[in-house]
Image: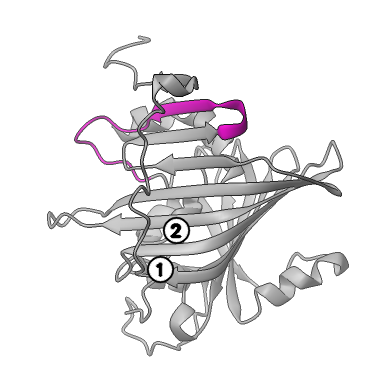
Amino acid sequence: MNGMIRNRNRTVRMLLSLVCTVAVAAWVAPPTIVLASDAAPEAEFESAQALLEGLERADRGIETLTADIQYDKHFLLQGDTHRRRGQLLFQSRRDGSGGPPKRAFEIDFNSLRIGGRLEEDPETWIFDGRWLVEMHPEQKQFIKREIAGEGDRADPLAIGEGPMPIPIGQKADEVLRRYDARLAPIEEPFTPDEQDLAQFVSDTWQLVLTPRPGSGEDDKYKEIRIWYSKSGERRLLPRMARTLSRAGDISYVQLINIETNVELPARAFDVTPPPASEHWQVQIEPLPAPGAGK
Protein backbone atom coordinates (compact mmCIF):
# COMPACT_ATOMS: atom_id res chain seq x y z
CA MET A 1 0.00 0.00 0.00
CA ASN A 2 2.86 2.40 0.73
CA GLY A 3 4.04 2.18 -2.86
CA MET A 4 0.53 2.96 -4.12
CA ILE A 5 0.32 5.94 -1.80
CA ARG A 6 3.67 7.28 -3.01
CA ASN A 7 2.74 6.93 -6.67
CA ARG A 8 -0.75 8.31 -6.15
CA ASN A 9 0.50 11.38 -4.38
CA ARG A 10 3.61 12.52 -6.23
CA THR A 11 1.64 15.42 -7.71
CA VAL A 12 -0.30 16.01 -4.51
CA ARG A 13 2.93 16.22 -2.52
CA MET A 14 4.16 18.98 -4.80
CA LEU A 15 0.92 20.88 -4.18
CA LEU A 16 1.33 20.31 -0.47
CA SER A 17 4.64 22.15 -0.44
CA LEU A 18 2.30 25.08 0.20
CA VAL A 19 1.57 23.82 3.67
CA CYS A 20 4.67 21.81 4.35
CA THR A 21 2.99 19.42 5.60
CA VAL A 22 2.83 18.66 7.13
CA ALA A 23 4.48 17.88 8.13
CA VAL A 24 4.21 20.39 9.71
CA ALA A 25 1.40 18.82 11.63
CA ALA A 26 3.51 16.12 13.22
CA TRP A 27 6.16 18.44 14.51
CA VAL A 28 5.31 17.56 18.07
CA ALA A 29 7.13 16.36 21.13
CA PRO A 30 5.99 15.52 24.66
CA PRO A 31 6.57 18.05 27.42
CA THR A 32 9.19 15.70 28.87
CA ILE A 33 11.02 13.44 26.47
CA VAL A 34 12.42 10.00 27.23
CA LEU A 35 15.53 9.61 25.15
CA ALA A 36 16.40 6.27 23.58
CA SER A 37 19.81 6.54 25.20
CA ASP A 38 18.27 7.15 28.67
CA ALA A 39 20.35 10.30 28.83
CA ALA A 40 19.39 13.22 31.05
CA PRO A 41 16.58 15.33 29.56
CA GLU A 42 18.87 18.30 28.89
CA ALA A 43 21.71 16.22 27.41
CA GLU A 44 23.40 17.51 24.27
CA PHE A 45 23.27 15.58 21.02
CA GLU A 46 26.70 15.33 19.46
CA SER A 47 25.67 13.89 16.09
CA ALA A 48 22.74 13.81 13.70
CA GLN A 49 22.21 10.13 14.40
CA ALA A 50 22.00 10.76 18.14
CA LEU A 51 19.39 13.46 17.56
CA LEU A 52 17.40 11.19 15.24
CA GLU A 53 17.47 8.45 17.87
CA GLY A 54 16.15 10.95 20.41
CA LEU A 55 13.36 11.90 18.01
CA GLU A 56 12.22 8.28 17.66
CA ARG A 57 10.00 8.72 20.74
CA ALA A 58 9.20 12.38 20.23
CA ASP A 59 5.62 11.77 19.09
CA ARG A 60 4.55 10.31 22.45
CA GLY A 61 2.62 12.26 25.02
CA ILE A 62 0.92 14.67 22.63
CA GLU A 63 -2.70 14.17 21.60
CA THR A 64 -3.48 17.63 20.25
CA LEU A 65 -1.50 20.70 19.24
CA THR A 66 -2.41 24.16 18.01
CA ALA A 67 -0.09 26.86 16.70
CA ASP A 68 -0.01 29.97 14.59
CA ILE A 69 1.79 29.20 11.36
CA GLN A 70 3.73 31.43 9.00
CA TYR A 71 4.76 30.10 5.60
CA ASP A 72 7.16 32.07 3.40
CA LYS A 73 8.16 31.00 -0.09
CA HIS A 74 10.87 32.80 -2.04
CA PHE A 75 10.65 32.17 -5.79
CA LEU A 76 14.04 32.20 -7.50
CA LEU A 77 12.92 32.88 -11.09
CA GLN A 78 10.16 35.37 -10.29
CA GLY A 79 12.22 37.10 -7.62
CA ASP A 80 9.25 37.61 -5.30
CA THR A 81 8.07 36.26 -1.95
CA HIS A 82 4.69 34.91 -0.89
CA ARG A 83 3.83 34.92 2.82
CA ARG A 84 0.82 33.11 4.23
CA ARG A 85 -0.34 33.22 7.84
CA GLY A 86 -2.91 31.10 9.63
CA GLN A 87 -3.47 28.43 12.26
CA LEU A 88 -2.51 24.80 12.56
CA LEU A 89 -4.59 22.13 14.33
CA PHE A 90 -3.12 18.69 14.93
CA GLN A 91 -4.36 15.46 16.51
CA SER A 92 -2.61 12.13 17.15
CA ARG A 93 -4.67 9.13 18.32
CA ARG A 94 -3.62 5.58 19.14
CA ASP A 95 -6.15 2.74 18.88
CA GLY A 96 -4.45 0.35 21.31
CA SER A 97 -3.21 -2.01 18.58
CA GLY A 98 0.41 -1.05 19.13
CA GLY A 99 0.66 0.40 15.63
CA PRO A 100 1.55 3.97 14.70
CA PRO A 101 -0.86 6.72 15.75
CA LYS A 102 -3.51 8.03 13.40
CA ARG A 103 -2.62 11.62 12.62
CA ALA A 104 -4.91 14.36 11.39
CA PHE A 105 -4.21 17.99 10.70
CA GLU A 106 -5.91 21.15 9.54
CA ILE A 107 -4.21 24.31 8.33
CA ASP A 108 -6.36 27.41 7.90
CA PHE A 109 -4.56 30.21 6.09
CA ASN A 110 -6.33 33.57 6.37
CA SER A 111 -4.00 36.01 4.61
CA LEU A 112 -1.55 36.20 1.73
CA ARG A 113 1.10 38.87 1.24
CA ILE A 114 2.80 39.09 -2.16
CA GLY A 115 5.63 41.56 -1.93
CA GLY A 116 4.07 44.66 -0.37
CA ARG A 117 0.49 43.73 -1.27
CA LEU A 118 -1.75 42.13 1.38
CA GLU A 119 -4.69 40.07 0.14
CA GLU A 120 -7.53 38.27 1.87
CA ASP A 121 -7.15 34.85 0.35
CA PRO A 122 -8.39 32.17 2.78
CA GLU A 123 -7.29 28.63 2.08
CA THR A 124 -7.73 25.43 4.09
CA TRP A 125 -5.98 22.06 3.98
CA ILE A 126 -7.34 19.10 5.99
CA PHE A 127 -6.10 15.52 6.36
CA ASP A 128 -8.32 13.22 8.44
CA GLY A 129 -6.18 10.07 8.20
CA ARG A 130 -7.70 8.98 4.90
CA TRP A 131 -8.76 11.99 2.85
CA LEU A 132 -6.86 15.17 1.97
CA VAL A 133 -9.07 18.21 1.35
CA GLU A 134 -8.11 21.51 -0.25
CA MET A 135 -10.63 24.38 0.06
CA HIS A 136 -10.65 27.86 -1.50
CA PRO A 137 -13.70 29.71 -0.10
CA GLU A 138 -13.36 32.80 -2.31
CA GLN A 139 -13.56 30.61 -5.42
CA LYS A 140 -15.94 28.13 -3.77
CA GLN A 141 -13.59 25.30 -4.74
CA PHE A 142 -13.46 22.02 -2.78
CA ILE A 143 -11.04 19.25 -3.79
CA LYS A 144 -11.02 15.95 -1.88
CA ARG A 145 -8.29 13.38 -2.61
CA GLU A 146 -8.15 9.89 -1.11
CA ILE A 147 -4.69 9.20 0.30
CA ALA A 148 -5.34 5.78 1.90
CA GLY A 149 -7.99 3.13 1.34
CA GLU A 150 -10.63 2.36 3.94
CA GLY A 151 -9.02 0.50 6.83
CA ASP A 152 -5.50 1.46 5.74
CA ARG A 153 -3.39 3.98 7.58
CA ALA A 154 -1.38 6.68 5.88
CA ASP A 155 1.08 8.95 7.62
CA PRO A 156 1.60 12.07 5.49
CA LEU A 157 4.65 12.94 7.58
CA ALA A 158 6.53 9.69 7.12
CA ILE A 159 9.61 9.39 5.01
CA GLY A 160 8.55 8.61 1.44
CA GLU A 161 4.82 9.19 2.05
CA GLY A 162 4.32 12.81 2.96
CA PRO A 163 4.64 16.17 1.26
CA MET A 164 7.52 17.13 3.51
CA PRO A 165 9.17 14.38 5.54
CA ILE A 166 9.76 15.34 9.16
CA PRO A 167 11.56 12.65 11.19
CA ILE A 168 9.45 12.56 14.35
CA GLY A 169 8.60 9.13 15.75
CA GLN A 170 10.44 7.33 12.94
CA LYS A 171 13.39 5.00 13.29
CA ALA A 172 16.71 6.72 12.76
CA ASP A 173 17.87 4.06 10.33
CA GLU A 174 14.76 4.62 8.16
CA VAL A 175 15.65 8.30 7.85
CA LEU A 176 19.32 7.61 7.19
CA ARG A 177 18.50 5.18 4.38
CA ARG A 178 16.94 8.06 2.45
CA TYR A 179 19.00 11.02 3.64
CA ASP A 180 22.49 12.07 4.52
CA ALA A 181 22.13 13.85 7.85
CA ARG A 182 24.33 16.25 9.78
CA LEU A 183 24.09 18.76 12.59
CA ALA A 184 24.85 22.36 11.65
CA PRO A 185 25.32 25.62 13.55
CA ILE A 186 21.93 27.27 14.09
CA GLU A 187 22.96 30.40 12.14
CA GLU A 188 23.67 28.42 8.97
CA PRO A 189 22.53 29.35 6.23
CA PHE A 190 21.01 32.73 7.16
CA THR A 191 21.98 35.85 5.23
CA PRO A 192 22.59 39.21 6.94
CA ASP A 193 18.98 40.11 6.07
CA GLU A 194 17.65 37.03 7.90
CA GLN A 195 18.91 37.69 11.40
CA ASP A 196 15.32 37.75 12.68
CA LEU A 197 15.07 34.09 11.65
CA ALA A 198 18.36 33.31 13.37
CA GLN A 199 16.97 34.87 16.54
CA PHE A 200 13.74 32.87 16.19
CA VAL A 201 15.69 29.59 16.30
CA SER A 202 18.08 30.52 19.09
CA ASP A 203 18.67 27.66 21.54
CA THR A 204 18.00 24.91 18.99
CA TRP A 205 19.68 22.07 17.19
CA GLN A 206 19.72 22.32 13.42
CA LEU A 207 19.35 19.07 11.49
CA VAL A 208 20.26 19.14 7.79
CA LEU A 209 18.88 16.36 5.56
CA THR A 210 20.17 15.88 2.03
CA PRO A 211 18.16 13.37 -0.06
CA ARG A 212 20.14 10.39 -1.30
CA PRO A 213 19.96 9.63 -5.04
CA GLY A 214 16.97 7.40 -5.78
CA SER A 215 15.32 8.17 -2.42
CA GLY A 216 12.15 9.53 -4.00
CA GLU A 217 12.80 12.94 -2.43
CA ASP A 218 15.85 13.89 -4.50
CA ASP A 219 13.69 14.99 -7.45
CA LYS A 220 11.98 17.65 -5.29
CA TYR A 221 14.45 18.87 -2.68
CA LYS A 222 18.11 19.72 -2.59
CA GLU A 223 18.01 19.88 1.18
CA ILE A 224 15.73 20.11 4.21
CA ARG A 225 16.70 21.94 7.40
CA ILE A 226 14.81 21.62 10.68
CA TRP A 227 15.52 23.47 13.92
CA TYR A 228 14.53 21.63 17.15
CA SER A 229 14.26 23.31 20.55
CA LYS A 230 17.00 22.35 22.97
CA SER A 231 15.52 22.78 26.42
CA GLY A 232 12.51 23.17 28.66
CA GLU A 233 8.96 22.13 27.83
CA ARG A 234 9.64 22.71 24.12
CA ARG A 235 12.58 20.30 24.00
CA LEU A 236 12.73 18.50 20.64
CA LEU A 237 9.77 20.47 19.35
CA PRO A 238 10.53 21.79 15.85
CA ARG A 239 10.56 25.56 15.73
CA MET A 240 11.13 26.04 12.03
CA ALA A 241 11.83 24.19 8.79
CA ARG A 242 13.52 25.36 5.59
CA THR A 243 13.46 23.60 2.23
CA LEU A 244 15.52 24.28 -0.86
CA SER A 245 13.80 22.91 -3.96
CA ARG A 246 15.43 21.64 -7.12
CA ALA A 247 14.17 24.79 -8.83
CA GLY A 248 16.04 26.93 -6.29
CA ASP A 249 12.94 28.13 -4.41
CA ILE A 250 13.35 28.51 -0.65
CA SER A 251 10.49 27.94 1.80
CA TYR A 252 10.34 28.63 5.53
CA VAL A 253 7.66 27.39 7.93
CA GLN A 254 7.50 28.77 11.47
CA LEU A 255 5.31 27.54 14.33
CA ILE A 256 4.38 30.28 16.80
CA ASN A 257 2.34 30.35 20.05
CA ILE A 258 2.27 26.57 20.33
CA GLU A 259 -0.16 24.93 22.76
CA THR A 260 -0.37 21.21 23.42
CA ASN A 261 -3.12 18.87 24.64
CA VAL A 262 -5.84 21.50 24.30
CA GLU A 263 -9.46 21.02 23.24
CA LEU A 264 -9.94 21.40 19.49
CA PRO A 265 -12.98 22.90 17.73
CA ALA A 266 -15.85 20.43 17.27
CA ARG A 267 -15.63 20.62 13.46
CA ALA A 268 -11.87 20.15 13.24
CA PHE A 269 -10.76 17.79 10.45
CA ASP A 270 -14.22 17.77 8.84
CA VAL A 271 -13.83 16.64 5.21
CA THR A 272 -17.55 16.66 4.36
CA PRO A 273 -18.21 18.45 1.03
CA PRO A 274 -20.36 21.61 1.15
CA PRO A 275 -24.05 21.05 0.40
CA ALA A 276 -25.14 21.40 -3.23
CA SER A 277 -27.31 24.37 -2.25
CA GLU A 278 -24.18 26.43 -1.61
CA HIS A 279 -23.01 26.00 -5.23
CA TRP A 280 -19.40 25.02 -4.63
CA GLN A 281 -17.26 23.35 -7.27
CA VAL A 282 -16.74 19.92 -5.70
CA GLN A 283 -14.09 17.53 -7.02
CA ILE A 284 -13.57 14.11 -5.39
CA GLU A 285 -10.63 11.90 -6.41
CA PRO A 286 -10.71 8.37 -4.93
CA LEU A 287 -7.70 6.09 -5.06
CA PRO A 288 -7.38 4.15 -8.31
CA ALA A 289 -8.85 0.65 -8.19
CA PRO A 290 -6.26 -2.13 -7.63
CA GLY A 291 -4.56 -2.92 -10.90
CA ALA A 292 -5.73 0.27 -12.59
CA GLY A 293 -3.25 1.72 -15.05
CA LYS A 294 -1.43 -1.53 -15.66
Residue 178 in view of the camera: no
In the image, residue 55 sits, relative to residue 120, either above or below, namely below
Residue 288's disc number: none
Q: Callout 1 environment at 10 Å: few (<14), some (14 to 19), or many (20+)?
A: many
User: What residue is pinned by disc 2?
Assistant: 167
Residue that numbered label 1 is attached to: 55
Q: CA distance from mark 1 to mark 2?
A: 7 Å
Q: Is residue 279 left or right of residue 1?
A: right
Q: Residue 33 appears in which quarter of the rendering?
A: bottom left
- Identified by mark 1, the residue type is Leu
Task: Classify mark 1: helix, strand or loop.
Answer: helix
Q: Determine the residue positioned at 33% across, 68% down.
A: 62
Give the magenta range: 137-155
Foreground residue, 199 or 181?
199
- Residue 7, image x and y in percent? 43, 27
- Would you say the residues marked 1 and 2 are in contact, meaning their CB atoms lie under 8 Å apart? yes
> Residue 44: x percent and y percent?
50, 85
The x, y position of residue 251, in whole percent, is 68, 50
Question: Residue drawn 72% across and 77% down?
Answer: 199
* 204 w.r.t. 119: above or below: below
Dot 2: element: loop
Residue 105 highlighted magenta (yes or no): no
Observer able to see residue 174: yes
Q: Earlier in the sequence, mark 1 or mark 2?
A: 1
Q: Residue at x 35, y 9 (%)?
A: 294
